[in-house]
Amino acid sequence: MLLASGLSVSLGRRPVLSDVAFEAQPGQITAIVGPNGSGKTTLLRMLTGDLAGQGAISLDGDTPATMAPRALAQRRAVLPQATAVGFPFTLREIVRMGHEAGHAAHRPGIVDEAVAEVGLSRKIDGFFHDMSGGEQARGHLARVRAQVWEPMRDGRPSWLFVDEPVAALDIGHQLQVMTLLRRFADAGGGVVAVMHDLNLTAMHADRMVLMDGGRIVAAGRPTEVMTDPLLSSAYRCRLCVNTAPPKGIWLLPQAAALA
Amino acid sequence: MATAAIAAAPATAVTAPRLKVGAVTAGLALILLTTAAASLSLGASGLLPWELFSRDLSPAERAILLDIRLPRLLLGALVGASLAVSGALMQGLFRNPLADPGLVGVGAGAGLGAVVAIVLGGLMPAAIHAATGMYLVPLFAFFGGWATTLILYRVASLRGQTSIATMLLAGIVLGALAGAATGVLVYLADDNQLRDLTFWGLGSLAGANWTKLAAAAPILIAGLALSPLLARGLNAMALGEGVARHLGVPVEGVKRGAILIVAAMTGASVAVSGGIGFVGIVVPHILRLAIGPDHRSLLPTAALFGAALLIAADTVSRLVVSPAELPIGIIMALIGAPVFLWILLARRATMEI
Ligand SMILES: Nc1ncnc2c1ncn2[C@@H]1O[C@H](COP(=O)(O)OP(=O)(O)O)[C@@H](O)[C@H]1O
Ligand SMILES: [Mg+2]
């Protein structure tokens, strides 16, 4: 289990997170949502140790900050919001970097499997920078998947931290990526994802964490967080949550324009 | 739940044009041996390559071979390998193919260090001389290069991202500053020291002898031998420092290691052969086109290619205006400057520089 408490950080002398407590269970997709600038990326970067600030974080009983980098890389993989590649590597070489850093480095064939999982097999030996923005995003996802290939290892969960993994993707690939994350969680892994699309999140996440102004204003099952007052207040417009048979909830985006 | 099984598009596979690393390595090794044999045998005294093995040499020929050409060959190979590997390391560190110790002022900084040692060496306490011996000049060159690289990295990198414009501009400024300081020292130098200094500006292997080789070789060999340890880290750093950290790379250690090795190799090279530019740009660039940017294969092949290139350039420099010599730095600039422009133009077409 991922447990964090008392997370506070200031960027450029402005407090961006203040006293945030966060938890995520293995076997679940925990989605962080909230309006632009509400601190989602900042929270994720605190959780992954990219930002130094105040607070305590424990990952399945260990303190990531004091773990050896290699050991930590075998337990959890992190996909930032954007990653620029500095040299003309091929997709295979990029994904191999994840594979070799991870806990299944000795097992052959994983690079091909991870690339197949995101539907890019045809481009595996092509230049990474020749792929479209959405394909590059899926390529990086394959890299972090190859790093923590086994969702459970030695009875301990592996973790994926992903910042807006579907932001650049068409609807078909959005579903593909969410299905990939779902399978990882169903097999025992932990997923913490910053998400933008509320409908997609409601459909796939086990828990939603709603942020606003550097604080968590609601957390719980999607049905608990996706309520008219909570969303309307956080996103500062009138939003109507609807339910559709047989189950599930959906948001009518046009409602925002009526506010 | 939607299964999101996306049918694979029936198009053909995409493949980046790459040569086999093994074949390229073998080819470069062969070229290195050939240029080495040519360099040993060609020259003002007109020995032919095959005569090395096919007949007994006179004492004079033997002296030319063993005391002049052999140390020069070995020094050229080590300096060429070091310059090429330094370039590759620096480019990996800055995530940019245009970073080169010679271009961004590290060579000038190392030169300043060396000139300080030559001109002000006499004023230093005897203890320093006793402790450093013949390593005084390489050591000062190392400190000069090290300080410049550190300043450069501090200026050009912010939160793990490097601005190439800032890096080149900062490099120009640091190079100018080091050049000015060097100028002041040259002004202070006496005639004897001036003779030592003249050979600097041009960049040449002409002064090679066993003593210089003995002073530089341990540093250069150590740098070459240690650099592969950084390969995996530099690969990961191509995705940014943050991602490299998540890939389990001790980023600060890799950065510090790369800066130290670049400074040591540039310092030692500059100390024995002056400033020879562009090897560090040309060699890694051509190799990245041929075999790709993976530092695990790039660093060793760069060493082979750099050694062969510098030996070849040195041989040409001894032959074209024989019996006089053209400084090797001039030849490398003639080859390297167009390649640099070519990289600039190619990058301008595809991305922001
Ligand atoms: N490096 C920075 N310096 C100053 N302010 C920052 C920095 N990074 C982010 N912020 C601010 O922190 C707030 C939260 O940012 P972020 O976590 O990226 O938001 P989001 O929820 O859209 O991911 C924003 O108001 C942003 O302007
Ligand atoms: Mg964000």
Image: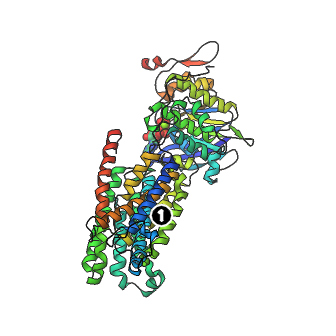
Front residue (pair B289, B38)? B38
* Label 1 CA crowd tier, 10 Å (few <14, some 14–19, many 20+): many
* Quadrant for the C terminus of chain B in the image: top left
Q: Amino acid at mark 1?
A: Ile
Residue B280 x, y percent position in the rendering: 39, 57
Ligand 1 under 8 Å from disc 1 Cβ: no
Quadrant of the image occupied by residue A158: top right
Q: Is residue A173 visible?
A: yes
Q: Residue at x 53, y 59 (%)?
A: B253
- Circle 1 marks a residue in which chain? B
Residue A9, placed above or below residue B227: above
Query: What is the x, y in percent for residue A234?
Result: 50, 29
Quadrant, the N terminus of chain B? top right
Name the foreground residue: B92 vs B156.
B92
Return the residue at label 1: B261
Whether residue B241 can be seen here: no
- Does residue B29 appear left or right of residue B270 in this picture? right
Q: Residue at x 44, y 38 (%)?
A: A129
- Placement of A165 over or under A10, stated as above or below: above
Q: Nearer the viewer, residue A226 or B123?
A: B123
Q: Position of residue A67 (x, y in %)?
A: 64, 53
Q: Secondary structure at mark 1?
A: helix
- Indicate the quadrant where residue A103 lies: top right
Task: Point out the residue furthest to the front here.
Answer: B55
For this view, does B43 lie left or right of residue A169? left
How many numbered marks appear? 1
